[in-house]
Amino acid sequence: MSKTLIRGAKVLGGEPQDVLIDGETIAEVGVGLSAEGAEAVEAGGKVLLPGLVDLHTHLREPGREDSETVLTGTRAAASGGYTAVFAMANTFPVADTAGVVEQVYRLGQEHGYCDVQPIGAVTVGLEGRKLAELGAMHESAAGVTVFSDDGKCVDDAVIMRRALEYVKAFGGVVAQHAQEPRLTEGAQMNEGVVSAELGLGGWPAVAEESIIARDVLLAEHVGSRVHICHLSTAGSVEIVRWAKSRGIDVTAEVTPHHLLLTDELVRTYNPVYKVNPPLRTERDVMALREALADGTIDIVATDHAPHPHEDKDCEWAAAAMGMVGLETALSVVQQTMVETGLLDWAGVADRMSVKPARIGRAHGHGRPVSVGEPANLTLVDTAYRGEVDPAGFASRSRNTPYEGRELPGRVTHTWLRGKATLVDGKLT
């Protein structure tokens, strides 16, 4: 069994320590460690975190391998410091049966760059009419615990209630894409001053907020868990904060792009900024940052949404919605949360590893950097600054909103159960 000695790393941003990996686990943590035959990694000044966990990734396979595959998506994940990702169900065919989720799960195991936990669809074909095989997907080899029609909202209150009741039996969670469809017909961007000036169809905040309000009340009524995907407005923050004050079992996520970018960028008409939910206002961005800092928003999730060049390099109205995010997420969080003093590195580990692993029941992930724990780890050069160049991405797609933008931090090493998947910034 191989050994790796990480020397002088700042564990969770604290004092420098050495960490010895022996096989799949952390064998020792201390100062001045030595280990005969161990491969040494000089980590002076770098921050060591538990491997990141993404509760919201689109891997596109099966069916849209021109955008991404499980292989390319998990390579992108390892490049970004992730050791586990949850793959959304809006594939072709939809992941609404045990067979499809098992296929995705086994592809993740086969490629070995990070663990892949499939998310099952809530409804058959994401059509919102009939519950999918929730129990069968949970009992499959994939052991699905998170269910979502992401990309579409479960807008029928009766179907949503039934889903919440069903998953309660095995401790599952329904992750809602909060978008009232009637309020967003023809919508192209956030509804506000910029949409009015540009003449683009507005996407009102209330379309998100009304669904969140309904669903937290449904979760309270049936005593089940609900998770809010890609929360994007200040009003949504207040609803979740209110729900938590009542003891409702709700969790919420925010994407890196909603922590940094605003609807002012849409003035460029560059479709790279077209995303669902849309980029919001500066006021919303500030509210999201504060809510992530105070725990109202539980986690950061990438909503990594790869698209081929032809689906984004076209006129705004015809362009697909979504951005890639796995390889830049930690850098954006460093800029928006750490460098602003809103979170320390222990807080980043909590929001990007510990809590997402807990919500999704990703066993072996989000664990402390301590003796006996699985060696799922990420090493970050926080002093690095550089321009984002999508040509170097591991993802099959290049639809990043950060091209040419200078961002801080760079993941140099990632270990999955003691195996290095990224070494000195290069995939193994």
Image: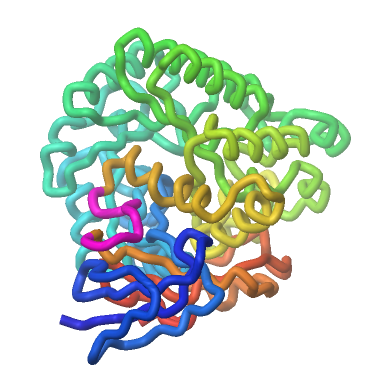
Q: Which residue is at a point 20% across and 31% down the rendered structure image?
A: 134
Q: Which residue is at a point 28% across and 21% down the rendered structure image?
A: 163
Which residue occupies the foreground of this view, 97 or 295? 295
Q: Which residue is at a point 61% across and 45% down the rendered structure image?
A: 275
Q: Is residue 202 magenta?
A: no
| Residue projecting furthest to the bottom | 37
In the picture, measured across the screen, residue 408 lies left or right of residue 11, that is: right
| Residue projecting furthest to the front | 32
Which residue occupies the foreground of this view, 415 or 181? 415
Q: Position of residue 337 (x, y in %)?
A: 64, 49
**Residue 330 visible in the picture:** yes
Q: What's the magenta region?
A: 363-372
Q: Main secondary structure of the magenta part?
A: loop
Which residue occupies the foreground of this view, 22 or 337? 22
In the figure, residue 407 lies in which quadrant?
bottom right
> Is 8 rendered above or below residue 164?
below
Quadrant of image for the N terminus: bottom left
